[in-house]
Image (cartoon, rainbow, N blue to C red):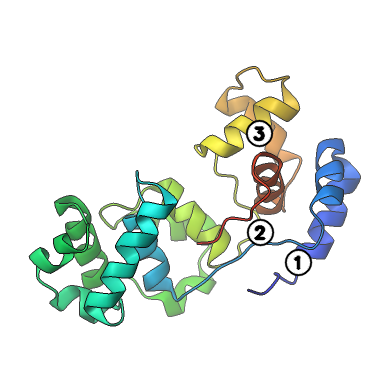
Amino acid sequence: MSTPDYWQQATRELAERDEVLCSLVERFQGLALGSRGDAFSTLARSIVGQQISVKAAQSVWDRLSGRLIAVTPASVSHARTTTLRACGLSGQKALYLRDLARKFLDGTLDAAGWHALEDEALIVELTQVKGIGRWTAEMFLMFHLARPDILPLADLGLQRAMRLHYNRGRPLSVLRMRKIGAAWAPWRSVATWYLWRSLDPIPVEY
């Protein structure tokens, strides 16, 4: 797991302009965004993990990896639905995984070209896949591509942390969250990561 090259600059600038983030940066030194796996397996993992616990998702993923040897577009595409279901996937998630595999195989999704796309354009491309919504696409941009300026407003952890630190625990509208987050640009991914840490010190990986 490598630290993005912008991390030091981002934490310094955020600490200078935001008191909350200043204290969080001091508390959680030496930690940064983490990614594992290639683009396909990262997106496949995000589909597997939807609406189930981290432990359950890992168990399904381990069974899937064991049955398919390697979780690749080709292996998922060639697997029978019954095989995918036997690994613990719902019928719907099996369909989602096959759709993802098909789009990688036919070139609808081309990871090689993603570095050239703006954040919003890439989110639009990823959300064409069944089972990948905006939140999942944002997590992929943050963790796999290490994009520095993502603000996942629908994320429950971010909502909770922003209420706690910026509104004395009271609810915040999306508009207000966006306005607070505007001050963190162009490092909103980094600010989000530190706010998550304030709720759970164990770093998330995707």
The answer to whether residue 106 shows anywhere in this view is no
Residue at x 53%, y 58% (from the top left corner): 119
Q: Secondary structure at mark 2?
A: loop
**1 over 134 or under it: above or below:** below
Label annotation for residue 6: 1
- As helix, strand or loop, the secondary structure at mark 3 comes to helix
* Label 3 vs label 2, nearer the camera: 3
The quadrant of the picture occupied by the N terminus is bottom right
Q: Is residue 168 left or right of residue 26?
A: left
Q: Are marks 1 and 2 in contact (CB under 8 Å)?
A: yes
Rate crowding at label 2 as few (under 14), some (14 to 19) or many (20 or more) other CA atoms within 10 Å.
many
Q: Are marks 1 and 3 in contact (CB under 8 Å)?
A: no
Lower position in the chain sequence, tag 1 or tag 2: 1
Q: Amino acid at mark 2?
A: Pro
Instruction: For marks 1 and 3, give the one nearer the viewer.
Output: 3
Q: Between marks 3 and 2, how big is the CA–CA gap? A: 19 Å
